[in-house]
Image (cartoon, rainbow, N blue to C red):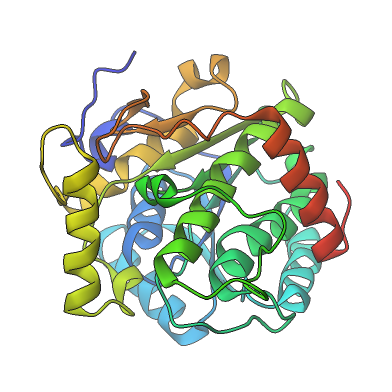
Amino acid sequence: MSSFNRDSTAEEVVDGLDLSGQIFAITGTSSGLGEESARVLAARGARIAMLARNAQANLEAADRIRSSVPDADLSTHQLDLSDLASVERFAAEAADQFDRIDVLMNNAGVMACPLTRTTDGFEMQFGTNHLGHFALTARLLPLLRQAESPRVVTVSSGGHRICDVDLEDPNFEHTPYDPWAAYGRSKSANVHFAAELARRFGPELVSLSLHPGAIPTNLGRHMTDEMTEAMNARIKASSSSGQGFQYKTLESGAATQVWAATAPELANHNGKYLTDCNLAEPGTSEIGYAPHIYNPSTEAALWNLSERLVGLSF
């Protein structure tokens, strides 16, 4: 459906677009895909709210963006997705500073970290990658509703293929902890959340999830060489081509989420999972999606569980 592909860059995706007047809130902007997405969108005239846990690193990222986009309209905000009180504080700040949010890009994440807990006691990957963004979206919904055609873009991963969510023990309180299983659960949760958000609020808003591709970023800071080799072996074993990681550049890695945030044609594909700037297809490769996604009963159950865990209702 798209003329773009795995090698297309975020700049190519928005070439010719005028995003002046649109407000984008992006999590995880202190580096990597979040910073690149913010830079490219700002270059097309968008106003960017840059959200990150590390305030100093976020300021430095904003300076880097301004060095290439001197007139970039940026604001930086401290947001720790592993702390629900921080999410609440930012939402209050946003209500004071913005009259609407046109696009919320749920980009931030952690991957394959040792067993740790969020401030609120959730397993770190599920708590940050899913519950933090779930709570953020809930709290920003009033601002999204003020936009003419709001979108919520949630960055998942081909890592959803590792396993589905565990609705009985989401925080590894009874299950032996495995960092890759925790990552797979959280990335499956991202896909389920995006689909259920579309089901509950479409056509009021467009909600999409995506796999950006394998990109060397700070996301992999917890990975040892052995973990990387094990993950590569897992991908090779499950792929019909027998190939492991097929790395993208940062510029190509940011393309799918920027396309998801801006492509008009995607309004007709609410709730879908994307990869390589196209609708993903089922399959065993890194870019194929696993059979357990697009499951309405799981999506509804996860939504209800998430509301109970974070103490919020949409």
Most distant residue in the left direction? 242
Query: Looking at this view, is 122 or 252 the one in front?
Result: 122
Residue 167 location in percent, x, y? 70, 53
Q: In this view, does 113 lie to the left or right of 86?
A: left
Viewport quadrant of the N terminus: top left
Asked if one can make out residue 116 in the rendered structure from this viewpoint, the answer is: yes
Provide residue 53's location: percent of width, then percent of height: 54, 78
- The residue that appears at 72% across and 26% down in the rendered structure is 199
Identified at 68% across, 74% down, the residue is 122
Q: In this view, does 270 lie to the left or right of 227?
A: right
Kindly tell me whether residue 102 is visible in this rendering.
Answer: no
Query: Considering only vertical position in the picture, is 287 above or below 149?
Result: below
Q: Quadrant of residue 289?
A: top left
249 vs 135, left or right, is: left
Q: Residue 114 sits in which quadrant?
A: bottom left
**Residue 221 image position (x, y, % from top left):** 31, 78
Against 124, is 244 above or below? above
The foreground one among 109 and 297 is: 297
**Which residue shows up at 38% across the image and 29% down it?**
17
* Residue located at (67% from left, 61% from top): 131
Image: 79 above or below 157: below
Q: In this view, does 210 lie to the left or right of 5?
A: right
Tag count: 0
Q: Position of residue 205 (x, y in %)?
A: 69, 29
